[in-house]
Image (tube, rainbow, N blue to C red):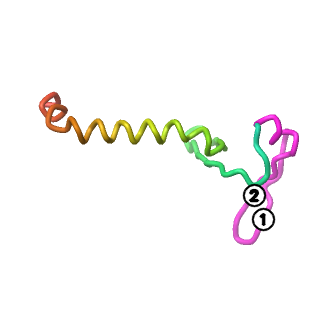
Amino acid sequence: MANKIIKIGSSAAITIPKKVLGNLGMVIGDKVYVNVDGKNRRVVVEPVANFKIEEERARYIEEFIKEHKKDLEKLSE
């Protein structure tokens, strides 16, 4: 399916057909992350809900690092 990049104010947009949104489990108004893979010239749009687990994992890792900082520094020597 080919879509056209359109101008909206000083920005650009690509429309997503309603059927595609439905297949993705998304609706108009959902928050999404837009990630750019410059190397492969791809744009990936994912629902914010997919990142909740990653954010929780990142917080856990940060807490682990803070708690075990001295031990981790010794291991890196």
Q: Residue 15: horizontal and vertical position, in percent?
A: 81, 52
Q: Which residue is mark 1?
A: 7
Q: Is label 1 in a helix, a strand or a loop?
A: strand
Disc 2 packing (10 Å; few <14; some 14–19; many ≥20): few
Picture disc at residue 72: none
Instruction: Using the image as rendered, state which of residue 68 and residue 76 is in the foreground.
Output: 68
Q: Earlier in the sequence, mark 2 or mark 1?
A: 1
Which residue occupies the extreme bottom position in the image? Answer: 9
Q: Is label 2 in a helix, a strand or a loop?
A: strand
Q: Amino acid at mark 2?
A: Ala
Q: Amino acid at mark 1?
A: Lys
Which residues lie in the magenta part?
Answer: 1-24
Q: Residue at x 65, y 42 (%)?
A: 46
Disc 1 packing (10 Å; few <14; some 14–19; many ≥20): few
Q: Which quadrant of the structure image shows residue 10? A: bottom right
Give yes or no for contact between labels 2 and 1 (Cβ–Cβ under 8 Å).
Answer: yes
Quadrant location, the N terminus: top right
Q: Which quadrant of the structure image shows residue 29? A: bottom right
Q: Which residue is mark 2?
A: 13
Q: Residue 70: horizontal and vertical position, in percent?
A: 14, 37
Task: Judge whether residue 11 is colored magenta.
Answer: yes
Quadrant location, the C terminus: top left
Q: Which quadrant of the structure image shows residue 58? A: top left
On screen, residue 26 versus residue 69, left or right, reads: right
Q: Residue 37: horizontal and vertical position, in percent?
A: 57, 42
Q: Residue 73: horizontal and vertical position, in percent?
A: 15, 35
Q: Residue at x 66, y 52 (%)?
A: 31
